[in-house]
Image (tube, grey):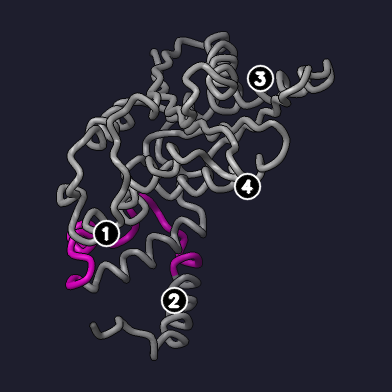
Amino acid sequence: MKMKVLAIMGSPRKRGNTYQATQELEKEMQKLGDIKFEYLFLKDAHLEMCRGCFNCVSRGEEFCPLKDDREDIEKRILEADGVIFASPVYCQMISGLMKNFIDRFAYIFHRPVFFRHRALAICTTAGSGMNETLKYLETLHIWGFGKMNKLGVIIPPWTMSEALKKKNQQNIEKSAHEFYKSLEKGGMARPTLTEYIHFRFMKFTSSMGDYFPADHEFYQNKDNYFYPVKISPFKRIGVTIMMKIVLFLMRDVGPADN
């Protein structure tokens, strides 16, 4: 069965280092099986700057005042089996294009939907900032992707040594195999402790319907987890106790009066 990967490219240079690294990964993955790559260049997408109005989080994404390609991009992600988030390192962090893309999908941090998908974070750097950039992209696992694969490629502005070329190629081949294997496995994994804590916390905050009506509607029929899955009783009891302690410590913290 053919699998489809959507590569979301965060570089303003359409055919730069990040694109070339992603293409090398594509070549390696196509050696492993029947897989189709599609590229979404944020440089060419009509995606306006987030205004920080919070409507998408609190009321629902349909209340976003910006009418552009956001909804179509979400559909393209849902239609894929795997997603690649690729960005160069700019000033020790992801590019502005990638950051605005993530900001425009802020509501998915609250209401994740990509549970049947797998994701890979790619970054290219001339030297520093790779770990910081990959760590930030890895936070997208909260969107439902679960554990994310990561690939960092170092491409200096001077002539690359043979040793570095070999290391980059080895990392690309390793990531290609790991990402392909995760796509091939498919399915919805049992949540980790961190993912289960995230669910319980979000379900609790959703009870404040006056502040988060969209979350309230999303979580009201989700008692166990985001999707049907068996949760260990030890995990459930442990997280319940932890949350009671946290809520006790936060008992004097409440919404500010405006």
List x then y, in percent, for residue 223: 28, 62
Element assignment for label 3 = helix
Q: Are marks 2 and 4 in contact (CB under 8 Å)?
A: no
Identify the residue shown where x is 33% and y is 84%. Answer: 254
How far is the residue under mark 3 from the one under mark 4? 22 Å
Instruction: Look at label 4 and name its amino acid.
Output: Glu
Nearest-to-viewer mark from 2 and 4: 4
List x then y, in percent, for residue 208: 23, 73
Quadrant in the picture for the N terminus: top left
Quarter of image, res 76 = top left
Element assignment for label 2 = helix
Element assignment for label 4 = helix
How far is the residue under mark 1 from the one under mark 3? 41 Å
Q: Callout 1: few (<14), some (14-19), or many (20+) C-alpha neighbours within 10 Å?
A: some
Q: Write the start and end of the magenta stretch as one range.
A: 209-236
Q: What residue is shown with label 1?
A: 54
Q: Are marks 3 and 4 in contact (CB under 8 Å)?
A: no
Q: Earlier in the sequence, mark 2 or mark 1?
A: 1
Q: What residue is shown with label 4?
A: 132
Q: Earlier in the sequence, mark 4 or mark 1?
A: 1
How far is the residue under mark 2 from the one under mark 3? 42 Å
Q: What residue is shown with label 3?
A: 173
Nearest-to-viewer mark from 2 and 1: 1
Q: Is residue 105 left or right of residue 89?
A: left
| Residue 33 or residue 62, whichever sits in front | 62
- The answer to whether residue 131 of the structure is visible from this angle is yes
Q: Is residue 75 above or below residue 90?
A: above
